Amino acid sequence: MLSKTELINLFNSNQTKRYAKSGKFIYRKALPNELIVSVLDNKIETTNISNNEFNCVIQNITVNGKNETYLITEKVFNNRYINTKAQITYNNNIWLIVIPKGETDAFEYIGESITFLAPWNEEMICNFGDYICKVPDTVDDIYRIEKDTFNLTYKLKE
């Protein structure tokens, strides 16, 4: 597993581009101690349990998307999404439709699979073609996005 320093060095040694989040997303507040499992291509990506900090559930509903569901903090939600106040009922929950506004600096990883610790303290596996991303204007908020999901939900800024 890469150390935080090795991960920062890897990110800084690659040419990155700025991308804007795109696609369609829904949001709801997490239930207390709710288990959220992100599954892509029948593989578990992340598992998290909601708490006082990680309490916003986001689901990607982009056409041909993978319906990835994940937990984020309210601060991250407010920085990366606009709440439209429009509601839908899905899987017996009321969700709000949100518009993404977040950005990321990223590069396509070309190499053998690596692992590192994500900012939410979960081990991530990065495979050939996946994207290594960093929240702009941060030093170590570095994470990985699976290549197909990245291509569906991020667009190069012009």
Image (tube, rainbow, N blue to C red):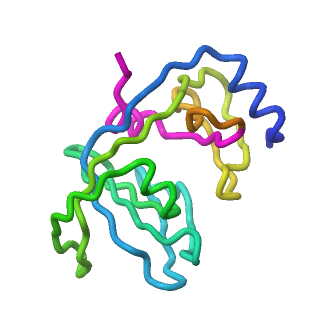
In the picture, which quadrant includes the C terminus?
top left
Q: Is residue 23 left or right of residue 74?
A: left
Provide residue 10's location: percent of width, then percent of height. Answer: 73, 25
Instruction: Examine the image and state in which quarter residue 20 appears.
Output: top left
Q: Is residue 73 left or right of residue 94?
A: right
Relative depth, front residue between 32 and 147: 32
Identify which residue, 19 or 129, lies in the foreground. 19
Q: Is residue 151 magenta?
A: yes
Residue 108: image x %, image y %? 53, 23
Where are the magenta residues, as a range?
A: 140-158
In which quadrant will I find the N terminus? top right
Residue that protrudes farthest toward the bottom in the picture? 32
Q: Measuring 53% from the left and 31% from the top, which residue is drawn there?
A: 131
Instruction: Answer with the quarter of the image where residue 50 lies.
Output: bottom right
Q: Is residue 72 above or below residue 95?
A: above
Q: Who's the residue at 30% across and 38% down the image?
A: 22
From the viewer's side, name the closer residue of 14 and 129: 14
Q: Say if the magenta span includes residue 117.
A: no
Identify the residue shown where x is 65% and y is 57%: 120
Looking at the rendering, which quadrant does residue 135 occupy? top right
Q: Vertically, is 110 above or below 148?
A: above
